[in-house]
Each structure stands twice: as C-alpha cells, then as structure tokens.
Image (spheres, rainbow, N blue to C red):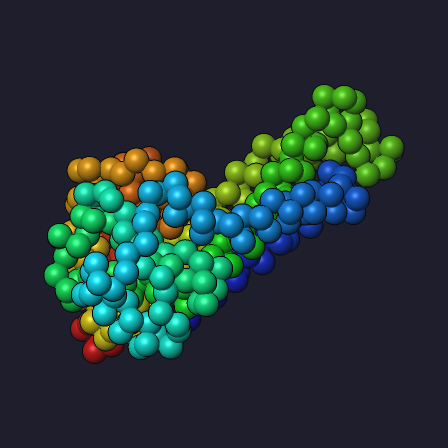
C-alpha cells in the first residue's frame, strides 16, 4: 500500500511540475503543445514498446514442448495472480535475468534469459516469474508510460524555453521580458526542473520494483525464494553485465548493466540489499 501511495504521490508531483513550468514558460499554449508532443510519442511507445524491447533484447518465443517446466511455472503463477497466462520468451544470453512487458494483462509477456534457467532452483525461478507477473498485474507499463509522458512534456517545455531565450525571450506577458526574476525563473525551469522530473521518474521505477517484489512474494507465499533469487541474479549481473539498451534497463528484475551507480537517486532499481531485507521481513511476519 505504501509503495502504491508513493507512486501516485510522485505522479501528482510530476503533474504539478508540468502545470507550473508550462504556465511559467509558455502559458497555456506552450504547455498544451508540449503535452501533445509527449502524448503522441508515448502513445506510440505504449502500443509498440513490447515489440521493440523483445526485438532489441533478441528474445524468441518458446512453446510448451521446448520448456514444459517454465510454461508450467508461468501458468501456475498467472492462475494464482488471477490474470491470463502471459506469452513466454527466452533471451539467448547466459547472464541470468528476466523482464515482463505488455500494456495490460491480456497482452502480457514474460521473458527470461537462458542463463536464469541454469542458475535458479524451480522455487527461485517461480519467485522471479511471480515478480514479473506482478508487474503485469499492477499495470506497471501503463504507470511508467504516464510518468514518461509528463517527464517528456516537461523536457519539451525546457527546450522551448531554451530556444526562446536564445532568440530574445519567451514570456507570458511582454511586461516580463526585462524582469530579472522572470529570467531567473526561466533558467531554473530550463536547468533544474527537467533534472528533478527525471529523478522523480526514477523514484517511481524503484517504488514499482518494491511493489512487484511484495505482490509476487504474496502470490506464491514464498518471499525467501524470491530473496534468494535476487541475491544470485545481482551477483551475476555485477560480474557479467548484459549488453542492453540503457533505456530498457529498468524493465529487468535486477539492473542488467554495471550496478556501480554513483548515486542511489540515479538508479532505476532499489538497492538489492533493501529488497532482500524487505522480503525476509515478510517471511518472518508469515506473509
């Protein structure tokens, strides 16, 4: 419940930022243009992102005859979660990892690497699948798209303000054109606000990971299995990072890139130690 509250709180903050910056820089017209452009781009991304990420990751569909155990696990977890069974894909990569995509439960896809099939026990694999199916059940693709729309619109506004300043100023009222405070406010909007919006977007991503851990652990009633799987996956991905598009890194259960992030705020994933600690706490509480 707390992670869900944080998500909607962050989305509300992004909405407020957009409204404030839009009116500060270009009034209603500028804000409307920026939002429209962001909506168009993210509308396309929303409907085709699953195909894009599957293609770029090299994932290939696997049928039941090729991996009956994996299909059985996916089917069992989906049944427990109360959603249709997602399509199953394999990524021909030895580094163990997994992700889910699909704009709603009817279009869900679970993809796992070849390496994860060799590393994890059946119960640990079930924990990973439960985490990914939780993303589908919680409609995290939709949530991330909404956040991307708002961050994209704010970024467009900042770019509009930047070009406006270069060509003589962009203000709601001509009276503001020589106002130092107005110029300072515009500079803040150009430099600081897009950074703040991106940090909020990353915070949303981290909160959804916590929620997927919690939902997945409750679905299979085995938080320890997921905790053990996360520890194994993190160790392998630190030693052997995957070659993936950085824009898609947030989709994986653990960061597939080098996890030596300079700042916690710049990470798409929560610290693995914190995720494991929360799961162990759930197990002790009998969840």
Quadrant (top left/top right/bottom left/bottom right) for the N terminus: bottom left
Residue at image location 79% in from the left, 34% down from the top? 171
100 to the left or right of 188: left
- Give the x, y percent position of residue 27: 78, 43
- Give the x, y percent position of residue 7: 48, 60
88 and 148: which one is in front? 88
Residue at image location 36% in from the left, 65% down from the top? 86
Residue at image location 78% in from the left, 27% down from the top? 169
Task: Please tell me whether residue 79 is drawn above or below residue 233 in the rendered image.
Answer: below
Q: Report the number of discs.
A: 0
68 and 230: which one is in front? 68
- Give the x, y percent position of residue 57: 35, 43
Task: Please tell me whether residue 58 is drawn above or below residue 13 in the rendered image.
Answer: above
Residue 17 seen by the camera: no
85 and 128: which one is in front? 85
182 and 224: which one is in front? 224
Residue 76 seen by the camera: yes
202 to the left or right of 36: left
Quadrant (top left/top right/bottom left/bottom right) for the C terminus: bottom left
Residue at image location 64% in from the left, 47% down from the top? 40
229 to the left or right of 4: left
- Give the x, y percent position of residue 72: 23, 70
- Residue found at the far right of this picture: 174
Answer with the quarter of the image where residue 62 lies: bottom left
């Amino acid at each position: 419940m707390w992670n869900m509250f944080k998500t909607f709180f962050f989305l509300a903050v992004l909405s407020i930022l957009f409204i404030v910056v839009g009116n500060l820089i270009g009034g209603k017209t500028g804000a409307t243009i920026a939002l429209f452009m962001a909506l168009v781009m993210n509308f396309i991304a929303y409907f085709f992102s699953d195909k894009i990420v599957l293609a770029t990751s090299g994932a290939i569909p696997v049928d039941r005859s090729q991996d009956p155990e994996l299909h059985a696990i996916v089917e069992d977890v989906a049944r427990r979660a109360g959603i249709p069974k997602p399509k199953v894909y394999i990524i021909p990569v030895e580094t163990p990892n997994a992700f889910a995509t699909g704009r709603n439960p009817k279009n869900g896809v679970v993809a796992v690497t070849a390496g994860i099939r060799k590393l994890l026990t059946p119960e640990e694999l079930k924990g990973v699948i439960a985490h990914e199916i939780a993303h589908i059940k919680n409609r995290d693709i939709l949530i991330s798209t909404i956040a991307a729309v708002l961050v994209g619109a704010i970024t467009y506004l900042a770019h509009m303000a930047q070009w406006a300043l270069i060509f003589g100023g962009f203000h709601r009222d001509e009276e503001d054109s020589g106002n130092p405070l107005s110029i300072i406010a515009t500079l803040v909007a150009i430099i600081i606000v897009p950074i703040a919006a991106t940090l909020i977007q990353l915070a949303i991503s981290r909160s959804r990971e916590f929620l997927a851990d919690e939902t997945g652990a409750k679905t299979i009633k085995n938080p320890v299995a997921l905790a053990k799987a996360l520890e194994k996956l993190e160790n392998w991905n630190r030693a052997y990072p995957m070659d993936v598009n950085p824009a898609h890194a947030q989709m994986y259960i653990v960061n597939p890139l080098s996890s030596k992030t300079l700042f916690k705020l710049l990470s798409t994933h929560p610290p693995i130690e914190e995720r494991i600690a929360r799961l162990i706490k759930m197990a002790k509480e009998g969840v």
